[in-house]
Image (cartoon, grey):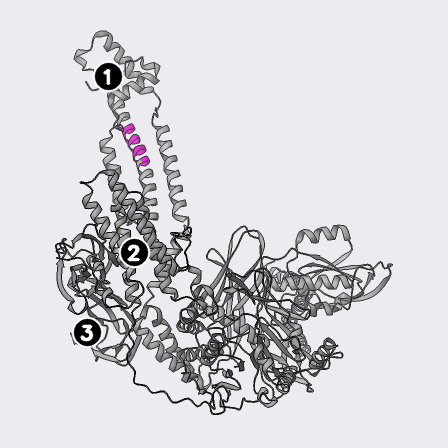
Amino acid sequence: MDNKGQHIIKALQKKWQLQSLIAYVLICLSFTAFISVVAYKFYHLSPLVLILFIMLVTTVSAIINRRWMVSLLDVTAYLNRNFSSLEESTLLVFKPAESLTLLENLQLYKVDAALQVIKDPHPFRKKINRAFVICFVSILGSLLISQLNFNTNANDKNSNQTIIVKKEKTLPAIASLSVKIIPPAYTGRSTKQQSVFNIKAEENSTVYWQLKTNIPVKKVQFIFNDSATITLQSSANNTVFQLQKTINCSGFYQVRTNDQLSELYQTEVIKDLPPIITIKTPQPNTVIDFGQPKRTTLNAALTDDYGIKDAFISATIASGSGESVNFKEQKIPLTISFQQHALAYQLQQSLDLAKLQMKPGDELYFYITATDTYQQQTRSDIYIVTLPDTAQLMDFEGLVNNVNFKPEFFRSERQIIIDAEQLLKDKDTISLETFNDRSNNLGMDQKLLRLRYGKFLGKENESNMGIEEPENMDATDFGDASQMIDAFTDKHDNAEDATFLDAPTKLRLKAVLNEMWKAELQLRSYKPQAALPFAYKALKLLKDLQQQSRAYVAKASFKTTPLKPEKRLTGDLSKIIPPLTQQQIIIKTAQDELFKNAIAVMEEMKYNTPASTGSTGVLSQAAQQLSSKAASQPTVYLSAYEAIKRIIISAQQTKKSFVKNDIEVVQKALQNMIQYPTVLPQQNKTGNIKLADQYFINLHKNQQQ
Amino acid sequence: MVVWNYIIVTLSALLLVFLLWKEMTRPVKLRLWWRIFATVTAVVSLACIAIPVTYTSTQNITAGKKIILLTEGWNKDSLDKLLTTGGNADTFSLDHFSASKLGAAKLVDVLGYGLSNSQLALLNNKPLVFHSSKLPDGIVDASWKRTINQGEKLVVQGTYNNISNKAITLYLSAFDSNVDSVLITPSTKQNFQLQTVPKHSSRAVYSLVAFTGKQVQESNPVPFEVQPSVHLKVLVLSSAPNFENRFLKNWLYQNNYAVVTRTGVSKAKYERSFLNTSAINTDNISASLLAQFDVVISDEDELNRLSKNELGNVKNAVENGLGLIIQADSMLNENAFFSRFFPLMASHTSDKKEVQLYFSGQASSLLQEQPFFIRTQPNTQVLIKDSAANSFSNLALYSKGKIALTTLSNTYSLLLQNRQDDYYQLWSMLLQKTAKQIKEEEQWSVETAMPNIHQQITLHLQTNKTASFGLIGSTKIYLKQNAALPFIWSGTYWPSKAGWHTVSAANGQPFYWYVFNNGHYKSVLATDKIAATKHYATLHPKPYANEATTAFPVKHTIPKIYFFLLFLMAAGWLWFEIKL
C-alpha cells in the first residue's frame, strides 16, 4: 500500500541516515587527521600517503561498521517512543493493506494523520553536534602540534646536516649534473647516483660524471688537486660532457668550462681497512707445565669492514737445542669456513700439541693471518707455547765441566726429585706408614738443602724463610731514576749488598728458597705428588742460576805500559786536557712558525686592511701547505683552502673587502695544524726606573745591617 | 643655522606675498579678511615648524631642590617611590642632560647603573645620592693578562651574574673553535676561570661567549698578545757531573738557548761545553764573564770552591741584576753571602716517598728520599712547596738581582716519567723568576681596564726621558708628568674606533692596546659605573643645607606640534571656505 505515512517515514530514514553518516565520517576524519598530523610531524611521512591513509580508514570503517545505517524499524521505533500521538502504532504504516484488520485500518488512518503533523524530529542533532565539536578539537590540536617548534631536535638535525652538506655553487654554464658512483664489486655496496659535485666514495670506486651545459662549451676540464687536468669527452653539440675515473685517494677538484673556474669540490675516499685480529686466549707466552694436558685453546675474533676472505694459522715448531735446533713450519687451517665473506668471525679452536708432534722442550710459535676481500693481509702478533723439558734438568752436562761452588746442592735437589718419584712409584707396594715416613724424610732433606742455600743470602735463621718478598714492580717506581742508576752502579757502603753475589743473583736465590719451602711443605704433609712441581721449579731456577754464573772472558793480548813510580800519587794533572764541547743547534724554520705568521698577518688584515707586500708571500706559503693538507683531508681543510685563496686574491688586488668569515675559517684551520707550544723560560721585562733601582739597593743595604 | 633661518624667512615671505596677491585678486571678495588672516597664520606656522621657536624665562629654584638623573638600567618603581617621598624634583634622562642643567641644584639623585668617572667629573662636585639598580645580568667582571709569553696559559677569570633561571654555558673560543667552557648554574653569581695555551704568536682576539642552550647571550672579545720569546743566557757551574744539569742543559740547548757549562771532573779540571754560543774563557769567573749571562745555576759545593775573588765577582754581579740559582746539598757554608736567606733543615722521615709539589698554580709530584726543606725567612718568597707547606725552593731579593735556592736534585725524573710539561713549567718558573730582567726604556700602560669606544682612556708612560707627547696612530696626545713620581707621564685619549690601537713615544716602540666596542662587556661597564658612582657618592654626601631661592634663567622650546595644528586649522579653513 502506498500511503503518505510511508513516504514521510522513508524520507525521515534517508535524512537520518545521511546525518548519521556525516557524524560518523566527521569523527573518523578527526581521529585519523590528528594521527596523520602527528605522524607527519614526527616521522616525516609523505602527505600523499597520509591522505590515502585517512580516506582508506574512513571508508573501510564506514563499510565495516554499519551502525550509521538507520533502518525503517529504527525510525518507527523512535517515532513511537517520542510521539504519543502515534500511539505506538507507526509500524502499521508498513503492514500490507490486505493483512490489515479493521481495527488496524482505523488505527492506520489515525497514525497517518498524526504523522503528517509531527514536527521535525532530530534524533541525530546531538550526535552531529558532538561530531563537530570533536572535529574542531582535533583540528585545533593538529594545528597546535604542527605549530609547536620542537626546536632542540629539529635544530640539531638541521645543523648537523648543514655541516656535512655545504651548499654547492656550480658554474652558470652547467645546466645539470649527474654523478654515478660505482663502488668496487667486492664491497657489495650498491651504485649511488647524485647530482652534486662533492663525492664520498669507497676506495677504488668508479665515478662517472655527466655534465650538461645550457650553451655549447668548447671544453670542460676537471682539475684534480690543483695539478692534474683532465678534459671531459664531449658529445651532442658540445653540451653533454662525460668523464669516468677511478677514485683511490681523497682530494679535491675544480671544474673549468672555457675559462671559468668553479669552486673546489671535495672527493672523500672511504679507505678499506685491513682485517683486525684479536686473540683472547692463549696468552702471548704460555708454558704448559709438566702434567698439564698438551693442548691450548685458541679463541680469537676477526673483523673487517667489507668481509673476510680467508684466514689461517701459521705455526712454527722449534725443537732441539743449541746448534741442532730444527724449525718445522706448517699451516693449520681454521675449522670455520669463510665462504660467506662475513664481516666478523669468532674463532674457537683447540690446538693439539701432541698432534703437532711436539715433544717436551719444543716450542710452538704461531700467528693468525687474515685476508680481506680487498686482498689486504693482517698478521697477528706471534704467540709462543712452550712445553718445558724436565729431563734436561737431570743431566750432568752443565755440572761436570764447570767450576762452581754450588754443584753439591744441585745434586741434592735432583736427588730429592728422583727419590720423590721413586716414592710415588713404590706407593702401591709399601704401607702407608712407610710412605709417610719416607715423605717426611724427604721433607727433612729439603729443609736442610734450603738452609744451606740460605747461607748464601746471609739468612741462617729459619724463621723468616719462605715468606715471599713482593716482586719489585711497584707502579710508583716508574720513572724513579735512582732505580735506574742502581742497576749500573755499586753500593759499596751497604753491608747487605757487600757479599759474593750481586743483587739479581740474590733475587733468584730467594725465589729458589721460596720454591723449596713450598716443596718441603707438601712433602711434610705426605703429598710428594704435589711437591714435585715445586721441586722441579726450584731445580729449574737453580739450573738457570748456574747458567748465569758462567762468563766468557776472551784472552786479550794487551800490554800495559810500565808504571812510572816517580809519578805515582803525585796528583799531577797538568798533562790532562779537559774535554770541551761546542755545539750549535740548527732549528729548522718549522712549519708551525709559518702558520703562526700567517695567523698574525690575517689578524692584522681584520683591522688594518691594506695588506703589506710581505704578507701575501706568507699567505701563499701557508696556502701551499693547506693545499696538500686539503688533498689528504678534504672534509676538514678544503673550505679553509678555498678561503685562503680568496684572501690572497683580494690582498693582491689591495681590495678592502676581505670576508671576515674567510679569515676566521683559515685561522681556525691553521690553528688546528699547529702543535701546542711548550713552556719556555723567558726574560721578564721591566721599566728602567732609576728610582726603583735605588729602592732595591737601599732595601738591600738595610737588610745587611 | 643662521643662514638656514634667513632662507626660511625669505621663502616664507615670498610665499606669503604670492598667496596674499592671489587672495586679493580673486573676483569674489567675500570673507576677504578672514582669508587673509588664515593665509598669514598658515605661512607663519609653516615657518615656525622649520625654525625652532624658543623663549627664555626666569625660574626660581630652591637650593634644596633636587635633580633626578636617570641612567641606564633605572627602574620605574624606584623612580615613583623617589618622586612620592622626595617631591619637588626635576627628572632628566641621561641623554637629555647637560652640565648646564645642573644649575644651582644642590643635590643629584642618580638612578640606574650610575655614571662613569669622566661623567662624574662634570658634576662639579655636587652632592649625589645614588639609588643603584641591581647588578645586571651577564659577565659582571672579567680579567686576563693582556700580554703572555709563548707557551704560557691564557687564563680568563671573572664573575657571571646569572639572574635567569636557565643554566648558561660560557665558552672561550679561539678563532672560532671552542677551547674551554664552564657551566653557570641558574640564579647564581658565580666566579669562573677559563684557560687555554694559545697556539699562535703576536696579537689575536679570542672571544668569550655566553650561551643559553643554543642562543647567544653575549659575545665579547678577549684581546691579548703573545710575546715573541726572548731567550736567556745561562751559565751552569757544577762541582761534579750529574743528571740534573745534564737534562737541564739538553732541554735549553734544544730550544736554542745559549748555555755554557763548567763541570768539575777532577782537581782544577773542568769539562766545558758551549752550546749555541761561541767558546769563552771560563777558567776564571770574572765580572766580564758574568756580565754575559742572565742567570747562573750552580751547586752550593761549587760556589764554596770558588776563590774569594771569584765569589766576590758573583756577589757583585747579583747585586747588579744577575740571577743566581743554587742547587743545595744538605750542608751549607754558613758564611757565604747567600746562606742566611736559606737555612736548611732535613725532613724527619727517611723513607722514600712521593712528595706533592706546588709551584705557580701547578701541582706535580716527585719521589724524594729524606728531602731538605728551607726554613722560610722574612723577605723571601716560597717558589716550590709540598702539601705541608714545606719549602723546597725559595727566592730572595739581593739588591737588584735575585737568588733562588732549590733542594730538589732529581727533577729530571719528571722527564723520565713522561711528565715533560711539569718539568718545563718548574724550570721555566725558576729561571724566569730569577733571571736578569730586560730594562725597557719606555713602558706604556692603559689605566682603564676595559677601554671603551667614546670613553676617556688614561694612558701612562714610564720613562726616564722627558716625554711631552705620545702618538696614537698619527694623533698626538700630550702627557703630564706625575708630580710625585717624575718618571710617570700620563695623558688621556678618547678613541673613536674599536679594535687595536698603538701608542708610542717619539721614535719609540709601539705599544698595542685594544678598544672595545659599545656592545661589549656591557655588564662589566655597568658594574664599573655602579662602583664609580658609589665611590663618588661617599665622597660627596648629601649636605644639611638651609633653603634659599635663586632666580635662574631657563630656555624653553615651544613644541612644533602647536604650529602644525595651527597650520592645519588655517589651511583647513582656506579649503573649506571655497566649498561654502
First in sequence: mark 1 or mark 2? 1
Report which quarter residue A511 is drawn in: bottom left
Residue B370: image location, x then y, percent: 54, 64
Label 3: which residue?
A241
Report which quarter residue A698 is drawn in: bottom right
Residue B233 can be seen in this image = no
3 and 2 marks in contact (CB < 8 Å): no
Q: Chain of mark 1?
A: A
Q: Chain of mark 2?
A: A
Residue B279: image location, x then y, percent: 49, 90
Gap in angstroms between the C-alphas marked 3 and 2: 83 Å
Q: Quadrant of the C terminus of chain B?
A: bottom right
Q: Secondary structure at mark 3?
A: strand
Label 1: which residue?
A93
Q: Residue at x 47, y 55 (%)?
A: B213
Picture layout, residue B249 above or below residue B414: below
- The residue range painted magenta reads A14-27
Gap in angstroms between the C-alphas marked 1 and 2: 119 Å
Q: Nearer the viewer, residue A680 or B90?
A: A680
Mark 2 surroundings within 10 Å by alpha-carbon count, few (fewer than 14), some (14 through 19), many (20 or more): many
Identified by mark 3, the residue type is Phe
Identified by mark 1, the residue type is Val
Mark 3 surroundings within 10 Å by alpha-carbon count, few (fewer than 14), some (14 through 19), many (20 or more): many
Q: Secondary structure at mark 2?
A: helix
**Marker disc for residue A538:** 2
Q: Nearer the viewer, mark 1 or mark 2?
A: 2
Picture layout, residue B217 above or below residue A118: below
